[in-house]
Image: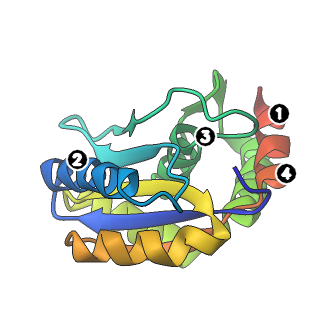
């Protein structure tokens, strides 16, 4: 993965639509040799109101955080930051510090996280893809063509790795 990856996060009507789009994106990427689509994840709330993620593609992405970890962080912050991350509870003063690092590392504002939380609460699901910055626009356009509403977020892997180490 590039040193400065981007998270393309596209919302779909429901989990089934997001799963279908994720699979279609994978097939589209196989036909385009210029893309480096390593893993795709889906972020959704389950029947009990718990945020869950599932990945499609390789289990390990090599160095740094993978799409599953990044979507887990997005889901945790969108739900108010009180969740389990790598076995450590995010809460209190240390949770605020970690949350601040995650905000910076994900390039998301409080408004972004609030919007994501509302959409998940409404039953929508998001497809998330970590890609090199030069491919973010193409992935975003394809997710839009598949019926999603995408937004691109810059990811600072150093800050996210540092914050993850702080809670591990």
SS class, disc 1: helix
Q: Is 79 displayed left or right of 20 in the figure?
A: right
Look at the image and tell me whether residue 108 can be seen. no
- Which residue lies under the disc numbered 4? 158
Mark closer to the chain start, 4 or 3: 3
Circle 3 packing at 10 Å, graded few (<14), some (14-19), many (20+), is many
- Which residue lies under the disc numbered 1? 165
How many numbered marks have been drawn onto this rendered protein structure?
4
Return the x and y of residue 47 as percentages of the image width and height: 18, 37
Q: CA distance from mark 2 to mark 3?
A: 18 Å
For marks 3 and 1, give the one nearer the viewer.
3
- Residue drawn at 83 percent across, 33 percent down: 165
Circle 1 packing at 10 Å, graded few (<14), some (14-19), many (20+), is few
* Closer-to-camera residue (133/115): 133
SS class, disc 4: helix
In the rendering, which numbered label is found on residue 19?
Answer: 2
- Which residue lies under the disc numbered 3? 66
* Image: 8 above or below 65: below
Tell me the quarter of the picture where residue 91 sits. Answer: top right
Q: CA distance from mark 2 to mark 4?
A: 29 Å
Look at the image and tell me whether residue 76 can be seen. yes
Mark closer to the chain start, 1 or 2: 2
């Amino acid at each position: 993965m590039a040193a400065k990856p981007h998270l393309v996060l596209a919302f779909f009507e429901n989990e089934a639509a997001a799963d279908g789009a994720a699979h279609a994106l994978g097939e589209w990427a196989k036909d385009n040799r210029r893309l480096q689509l390593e893993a795709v994840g889906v972020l959704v709330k389950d029947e009990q109101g718990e945020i869950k993620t599932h990945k499609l593609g390789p289990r390990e992405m090599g160095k740094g955080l993978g799409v599953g970890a990044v979507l887990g962080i997005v889901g945790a912050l969108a739900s108010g930051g009180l969740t389990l991350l790598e076995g450590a509870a995010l809460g209190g003063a240390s949770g605020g510090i970690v949350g601040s690092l995650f905000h910076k590392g994900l390039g998301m504002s409080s408004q972004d996280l609030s919007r994501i939380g509302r959409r998940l609460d409404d039953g929508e699901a998001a497809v998330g893809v970590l890609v090199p910055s030069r491919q973010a626009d193409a992935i975003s356009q394809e997710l839009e063509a598949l019926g999603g509403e995408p937004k691109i977020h810059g990811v600072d892997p150093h800050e996210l790795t540092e914050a993850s180490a702080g809670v591990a």
